[in-house]
Amino acid sequence: MKPKLAIWKFSSCDGCQLGLLDLEEELLQLAERVEIARFVEASRRVLPGPYDLSLVEGAVSAPEEVEQLRRIRERSRVLVAIGACATAGGIQGLRNFLDFDPVKVQVYPRPEIVRSLATATPVSEHVTVDFELHGCPVEKGQLLELVSALLAGRRPEIPAYSQCQECKAAGTPCIMVSRGEPCLGPVTRAGCGNRCPSVGRGCYGCFGPSEDANPAALGGRLAELRLEEATIRRWFRLFTAWAGPFREESLRHE
């Protein structure tokens, strides 16, 4: 029997699931090797568990999501969190730095009917995660490598070093050195293909902290560029603001 693959969505924009659809021909080849038991972005068909591999997209931000996630974990042999929301809270994690109740009053006409947790948190804060695939959204090549490796019983070959290494390999001039502009590349995990620096923009940290990230050192360098404390704080509160190293450094600039 083919191994069962299930894809799940929590609080997110669906961008990481679209990354799986973007595989196109590779997705057809993947479908020959696995039974896609649940993928509502692509099909209405839903098969019952247990599942050999579950890919979970999105942050946990509602009470019912906590319970659903626990049931998914119980029915999944391998569970992988994919994308910035599932691995670091994503954009939703920005609310964790605020009192959420006044925000609901400003946004919703009937805030009393909004069922949500006070925080939006990554999947790993609620259940055991076997692997995390970072990015906003995830890169389709990494997604294919992840699924192929796990089905083959080997560890995925996903980079954990910083974005700076990708810039060097591509011959891209350092944004901070050549332009004196802020960039999160020194503390951000590689994997995007050098997307922003290659067009002259500083890295926004979409892939979260690299394995040996030193945000405090980067914060000091940003201060040397004469950025105000509030500006430095905002740089660490972007797509992966609730990731531990970024969160701690942003709080230092309160």
Image: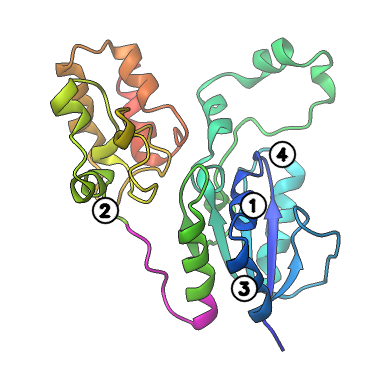
Marks 3 and 2, how far apart at CA: 28 Å
Disc assigned to residue 30: 3
Where is residue 127? Give x, y as percent: 58, 58
**Is 165 contained in the magenta span?**
no
Marks 4 and 1, how far apart at CA: 20 Å
Mark closest to the chain's N terminus, 3 or 1: 1
The answer to whether residue 105 is left or right of residue 151 is right
Judging by the rendered image, the residue that carries numbered circle 1 is 17
Mark closest to the chain's N terminus, 3 or 4: 3
Disc assigned to residue 161: 2
Where is residue 197? Give x, y as percent: 30, 34
Residue at screen point 77% across, 73% down: 49
The correct choice, above or below, for 8 with respect to 192 in the image is below
Q: Tag 4: residue type?
A: Ala
The answer to whether residue 241 is left or right of residue 100 is left
Element assignment for label 1: helix
**Is 152 contained in the magenta span?**
yes
Q: Tag 3: residue type?
A: Leu
Where is residue 230? Give x, y as percent: 35, 12
Mark closest to the chain's N terminus, 1 or 2: 1
- Tell me the magenta residue range: 150-159
Where is residue 173? Give x, y as percent: 18, 35
Label 3, residues with CA under 10 Å away: few <14, some 14-19, many ≥20: some
User: Can you say which quadrant of the picture contains the N terminus?
Assistant: bottom right
Mark closest to the chain's N terminus, 3 or 2: 3
